[in-house]
Image (cartoon, rainbow, N blue to C red):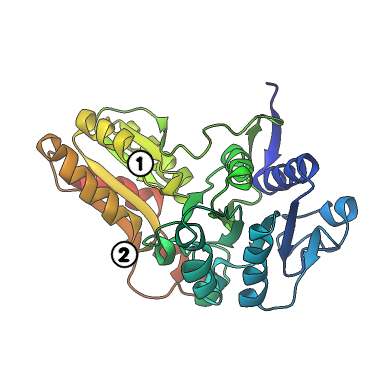
Amino acid sequence: MPTEELTYREAIVAALREEMQRDPTTLIMGEDIGASGGPFKTCLGLYEEFGPARVRDTPIAETGFVGAALGLALTGFRPIVEIMFSDFLGVCFDQIVNGIAKHRFMSGGRVKVPLVIRSIGGGGLRFGAQHSQTGESWMLSVPGLKIVCASAPDVAYTMLKAAIRDDNPVLVIEHKALLSTKGDVAIGTEPDGALSGPKILRTGSDATIVASLAMVPRALAAADLLSAGGIEAEVIDIRVLRPMDTRPICKSVRKTHRLVTVEEQAQVGGWGAEVAAQVVHEAFDYLDAPPARVCLPDYPLPYSPVLEDAALPSPEAIAAAVRALM
């Protein structure tokens, strides 16, 4: 399959366009996604191509339009909801965790809930504490909900297509600091197996680094720093947080004997704790050091550029965490 260089933003638009062309029951709803193309331009050109019936500008009322998406999903549509900032997942939290995630189970499997929630989050762009969260920890403990994290254009493309075709609700977390990053994308690729979980991006023998979203390129940069000093780190993009498959991570740790997780969230309640717990359970005898977690400090993300940069995990901080285990 020939590839095309796209930005992360363009990859999202391409996936949406292809799936809307493929299936006329697919539509997208959200704030300012119509003629303006979305606040982050992740719906650019869709309104002109598919019209207001399938690209629906909504009021500033997440509880309302997320609830409406559930109704659409139950009546034969495949709705996609865009949450402008992941922080606003809190507004429609009840609709997601007590409605969308539980509906198929409570119907005894008689109904499907083919619904995608796209939320755009993350720090690094000076949006302040209320507009810079990624939000996945809030949803991590909710059965019935799939959670995927897109760290690069090709991942954003294939995972979004797979999520739209899934008959279960999927939360797709995108990172606004990655929107302009570029990568090769195989346009037209069928998304079979795209929600399959962790992927090794760099092989190594001395430590395993597991990261998500914008922390993935930072983990790769940390691996370069470590390599210059003779330490070879294996870097894994976790990609799917629910259902979480830690088997590839455990296999890597059995080889490297050390684990570092990197996430743009507070340490308490983060996915890194679950990965560490499962690795300890499955590969305890192979660990030469306790698992380490590189996270945000335990306070809201600052607006100050200097303070925000200091709070976000840096390649240097990730590399230091690995060296401390050696």
Residue 251: image location, x then y, percent: 26, 31
Secondary-structure class at tag 2: loop
Observer-nearest residue: 315 or 162? 162
Seen as rendered, the residue at the extreme left is: 285
Disc 1 target residue: 245
Disc 2 target residue: 269
Observer-nearest residue: 30 or 13? 30
Is the residue 298 above or below the residue 36 in the image? below
Is the residue 155 above or below the residue 310 in the image? above
Residue 162: image location, x then y, percent: 59, 41
Is the residue 185 above or below the residue 171 in the image? above
The quarter in which the C terminus is drawn is top left
Seen as rendered, the residue at the extreme top is: 1
In this image, 92 relative to 138: left or right? right
The quarter in which the N terminus is drawn is top right
Sequence-wise, the earlier of marks 2 and 1 is 1
Secondary-structure class at tag 1: loop
Distance CA(mark 2)–CA(mark 1): 18 Å
Q: Quadrant of residue 153?
A: top right
Q: Residue at x 55, y 66 (%)?
A: 86
Amino acid type of the residue tagged 2 in the rendering: Gly
